[in-house]
Image: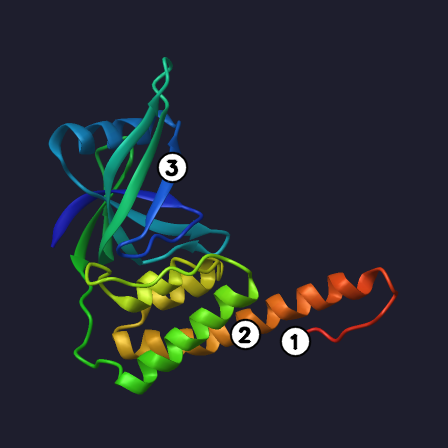
Amino acid sequence: MDEIGVFPLGLVLLPGERIPLHIFEPRYRELIAECLDDDREFGLLLSDDEGTREVGTTAAVVEVLERFDDGRLNIVVEGRDRFRLHEETAGRSFMTAQVSPLDDESERPTEPEVERCMAAYRRVVEAADAELEEPTDETGALSYWLASRVDFGVEVKQELLELRSERERIVRLAGLLDHAREAIVWAKTAQERASTNGRVEPPG
């Protein structure tokens, strides 16, 4: 097991996903400064009213967008590997913990399962009138790539993060994407009918 600095936040970072962070608390400014100086990663864990989760993602600072005179930072971090928290440790101003890697089991999705999931993703993009992005050879795990492009909310992202096989994630995502498309279509229909006092039933 390794000891790493941990940043509990109200968000989930998936492997391969990039997100911006505003670092303002002195203890986390210290953590990020050490990561930048020593080219180290830190752990990011979802923390909300239900507590701090045990499964998170290591994060690397890939860009410093802005440094403020008072020490605050705007940075971009990239998710790397999943980990499981075993025990919090003490002695630093920021949270530290003993963690171990959380690897996938070997089960892979079948080609039809991948095709169904990708088709569902394309339908969501079409329904949202968004620009279609396609995965490339450098994409990494397809499930994480897809989940980082649709706003499913932190609980769903955490669920996906904790699943132990790519097949489980792909199968789960196909259903989530179908539901997301239904919600987008319903919202558009409701907006169109609002001016005529029409009624629509929300998706179940």
Which residue bears the numbered disc 3? 21
Question: Mark 3: which amino acid?
Answer: Leu
Which residue bears the numbered disc 1? 203
Please state if 183 lies on the left or on the right of 148 as rendered.
right
Task: Label 2, secondary structure: give it.
Answer: helix
Q: Are the residues flagged by discs 3 and 1 in contact, CB closer than 8 Å? A: no
Front: mark 2 or 3: 2
Question: Mark 2: which amino acid?
Answer: His
Crowd class of label 2 (few under 14; some 14 to 19; many from 20; radius 10 Å): some
Q: Residue at x 42, y 50 (%)?
A: 11
Q: Earlier in the sequence, mark 2 or mark 3?
A: 3
Question: Mark 1: which amino acid?
Answer: Pro
Q: Are the residues flagged by discs 1 and 2 in contact, CB closer than 8 Å? A: yes
Where residue 188 appears, as percent x and y from the top left, is 68, 64
Task: Label 1, secondary structure: give it.
Answer: loop
Return the residue found at the far right. Answer: 197
Mark 2–mark 3 Cα distance, whole angstroms, equals: 29 Å
Q: Is residue 23 above or below residue 45?
A: above
